[in-house]
Amino acid sequence: MQVGLPRAAFGFLILFGLYQSAEGIGRHLLQSFPVQAGLMLLCLAAAWPVGRFVLRFRGFDAFALEWHRSVPLWLLGAIVLATSAKLLSVAAGVGLGAYSVQATSEQPDFASAAPLIALALISTFVPSVAEDIITRGFWWRVPWRALRGATFVLITSAIYVLNHLYRLGNGPTEWLMLFCFGLAYGVAIMKTGSLWTAVGVHWGWNLTNEVLGHFARIEVMSSNTPFISAAAHLAMAALMLLLPRREMPDGRCQLGC
């Protein structure tokens, strides 16, 4: 049984509105990181009641976020893949003259670095999983059970581009880069049936980018850097296509749930 269009649209608009308000109100209007972070956290928190009471799944299961024995392995593997891809893309960028990397003048010791890394873990995880819910998890489970394979990957990659409302003005190069990002994250859920794999790739890339910024100054020296990031994500997508495909249960509430 599919979710009715009114329920699906209502649930999506709640989450989409909260997600966009984080950047629109918190960042651009009020220029307040606490407000931005609070609204983003509210978006993630709202996903459970939306999934349970609006979409009639078992909470986060509405977005393919079931927790099972395979999830830690997939999540860790995806993070390692994304971290490796990010480091290699920076190294390639330096070799091509697209990036200039210099160590910070004062290298932090463990005591000072640990809180920075802990904050980076949280500040990159929440927006990554919230965006993955809106642009991938929702579309994997809620409206059309037939949306699978290449169709799912291509459509959700386009949705991922459109979700970046405040970056669309950067032009076609930005759109292409975001679309390639979406391809990698879409392939991750397509192959495993779990949004956690896509979260791992997305989060791993953002986390590595954030942590690198604490230990080094990375200056962009060329307008071609989006192509380097796009190529890194296409490489990750190609590697993940080699994974055996697995379909998870649909996570719907049974009678009495």
Image (cartoon, rainbow, N blue to C red):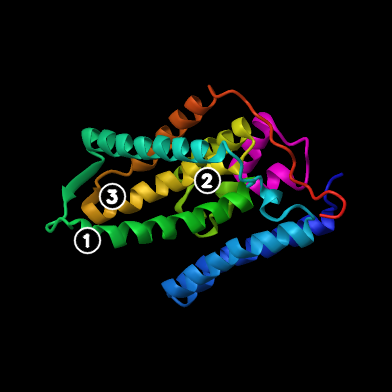
Outermost residue, bottom side = 30
Q: Is residue 37 left or right of residue 58?
A: left
Q: Residue at x 49, y 40 (%)?
A: 75
Q: Which residue is mark 3?
A: 212
Q: State the separation of the CA atoms marked 2 and 1.
A: 28 Å
Secondary structure beneath dot 3 equals: helix
Asked if marks 2 and 1 touch (Cβ < 8 Å), the reply is no
Q: State the separation of the CA atoms marked 1 and 3.
A: 17 Å
Q: Position of residue 247 (x, y in %)?
A: 69, 32
Amino acid of disc 3 = Leu
Q: Residue at x 57, y 64 (%)?
A: 20
Secondary structure beneath dot 2 equals: helix
Secondary structure beneath dot 1 equals: helix
Where does the N terminus fall, quadrant-wise?
top right
The reply to whether the magenta stretch includes residue 144 is: yes
Q: Position of residue 94 (x, y in %)?
A: 22, 38
Asked if marks 3 and 2 touch (Cβ < 8 Å), the reply is no
Amino acid of disc 1 = Ala
N-terminal of the pair, mark 2 or mark 1, is: 1
Q: Which mark is residue 199?
A: 2
Q: Is residue 60 above or below residue 23?
A: above
Q: Which mark is residue 111?
A: 1
Q: Residues within 10 Å of mark 1 (few under 14, many from 20)?
A: few
Q: Position of residue 55 (x, y in %)?
A: 78, 56
Identify the magenta region: 137-158
Q: Residue at x 37, y 61 (%)?
A: 119
Amino acid of disc 2 = Val
Comparing marks 1 and 3, which lies closer to the viewer? 1
